[in-house]
Image: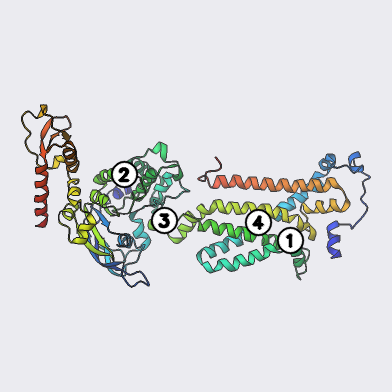
Amino acid sequence: MARAERGKATAAEIVFDHVWHHYPGRAVAAIQDLSLTIPAGEICVLIGPSGGGKTTALKMVNRLIPISKGDITIDGRSVQAMDVIELRRGIGYVIQQVGLFPHMRVEDNIATTPRLLGWPDEEIRSRVRELIELVGLDPEEHARTYPSKLSGGQRQRVGLARAMAADPPLMLMDEPFGAIDPITRERLQDDFLRLHQTIRKTVIFVTHDIDEAIKMGDRIAILRPGGLLAHYDTPENILAKPADDFVARFVGADRGLKRLSLRTLREIELLDAPRDAERSDLPSASEGTKVRDALSVMLTSGNPSLLVTDDEGTVRGMVTIDLITALLSTAERSAVS
Amino acid sequence: MIGVVLALVGEGPTIPDFGRGSDCVRGRGQFCLDWVVDNFGDQLLPRLIEHIELTAIAVSIGFVIAFTAALLAHRYHWVKTPFTAFSAFVYTIPSIALFQLLVAVPGLGLSWTSAEIALVGYTLLILFRNILTGLQEVPRDAIDAAEGMGFTQRQILWRVELPLALPAIMAGLRIATVTTISLATIAAYIGVGGIGQPIFDGIQRGFKTQFVAAGILAVTLALVADGLLVLAQRALAPWVRYGR
């Protein structure tokens, strides 16, 4: 009974309503008049140069840092009106250094919040097993080991499982993959996105890596130094039409290319392939290839067109450099409107 | 002063009577195992038990005081310096002098209490430093995570900080215990028994077997106590990787 109820915890809508934060003794505010709405179930990435206040903004949600003025609400309830301990137990929290408890086995680390909340033992045990599998670890092999025996990537997987243990409607992730090598980081990002498809929680995700932001975010909030919101929109729109010079510089001169990595060949309208395509010596790529990678193949092969095949190798159409150019310009126009 | 010496030797300085016992004992041999075997039950064992009592009580009381002070110092930083200064001062007083000083205090005299006060005093510096260092070296990220997950301050202390400080605390207990076992032999100087008594007695009577046997007993006790604490530490802190 209790289990089913808890399992149903849905995502929450988060609203920053004219939020300010002043660090005591400093003249300039760390966060100035920050207002943004994060729809339930979406991943919102907070990004900006260091000193931009992104971690400050994140920590104000679970009140590790106090709100000086304004308010933050979770599903309409002000975080300032809630008991701070209860508030934090209801939010998943993941940090860059992971912060696993070295003296607890993996299973006990994951069971932390359910135990604080007083779940029955039987329920905790089954939830822990479920979570270990969910984050891609093996219960037999990893449940009873201590964190010191795990690799960096495995530790962050345990950190994720621990944050999700009590099925919170909101997760705060503070540079969760920042200290992990690039190859493992990519795998963790992919696994987390896949996981998010099923759990659909609201996630606030802090990073300083624009590529990670574009990859992970349903929306991206770019903060400029002093904690001012520079641009808040979908990755596509930010890349197509940066709000100002600061945002344009921040996302980088290759923003056009970055936009191309947002879509795969399956998601664009292809040209018809020439009749004898199968026998031609045109390069080819599968439908799951990112448009950006397809462009790279054309450029390196010195051929302005590329055949697109499905998983069975059947030709589905063709893409050309001109088509990609056109794609970028139409998207730019639609983003403006 | 004379009173103290009398108490130490018991019946006062007498010519040792080696009339009874084996050839080894009568011939003032280097070490007479047969004497040890014959007299272990009534001469050495009771002193050993007294010694264990002296040590256990001193370390326990010392631990309670040092633990409380360390928790206070962890929370209120200003506590650290005065307590360190006090316990370091006590630690530097030569032990015989401290026993002597306490004996001179009205109401204490040649008592068990005097002995325990001195022994407790010597444990404080080691225990306080180790407990406080242990608490301060808990990884910051574990505390940050605990705070963010909704632990109360008390839960952070008892479920995160103290368990993680345990190896340092146990290391302090080991040093304090071994030190106290050694110092407690000197407590015999004020007539409270313990293994120090047969040692002083043997030296006084020129009976080598007695003080060598008692000395070996004291060293063995220290080694056994240390070994038991190591085992306890491994049982209580299984996450620490020991040796290779």
Which tag, 1 or 3, sits closer to the chain's start?
Answer: 1
The answer to whether dots 2 and 4 both sit on one chain is no
Chain containing the residue with disc 1: B
Chain containing the residue with disc 2: A
Chain containing the residue with disc 4: B
Residue holding disc 3: B146
The answer to whether dots 3 and 4 both sit on one chain is yes
Q: Which one is nearer the viewer's eye here, B159 or A238?
A: A238
Q: Position of residue A98 (x, y in %)?
A: 39, 51
Q: What residue type is labelled 1?
A: Ser
Q: Would you say the residues marked 3 and 4 are in contact, meaning their CB atoms lie under 8 Å apart?
A: no
Cα distance, mark 2 to mark 4? 50 Å
Q: Which mark is residue A283?
A: none
Q: Which amino acid does label 3 sit on?
A: Ala
Q: Position of residue B58 (x, y in %)?
A: 67, 58
Residue holding disc 1: B95
Which residue sits at x=55%, y=51%?
B167
Mark 3 crowd level (few <14, some 14–19, many ≥20, 10 Å Cα) = many
Residue holding disc 2: A188
Measured along the vertical axis of the image, is residue A243 above or below residue B210?
below
Residue A10 in view of the camera: no
Q: Is mark 4 on a helix, strand or loop?
A: helix
Chain containing the residue with disc 3: B
Residue holding disc 4: B59
Q: Which residue lies furthest to the top in this view?
A: A279
Mark 2 crowd level (few <14, some 14–19, many ≥20, 10 Å Cα) = many
Measured along the vertical axis of the image, is residue A179 above or below residue A24?
above
Q: Position of residue A247 (x, y in %)?
A: 21, 59
Mark 1 crowd level (few <14, some 14–19, many ≥20, 10 Å Cα) = some
Residue B128 in view of the camera: yes
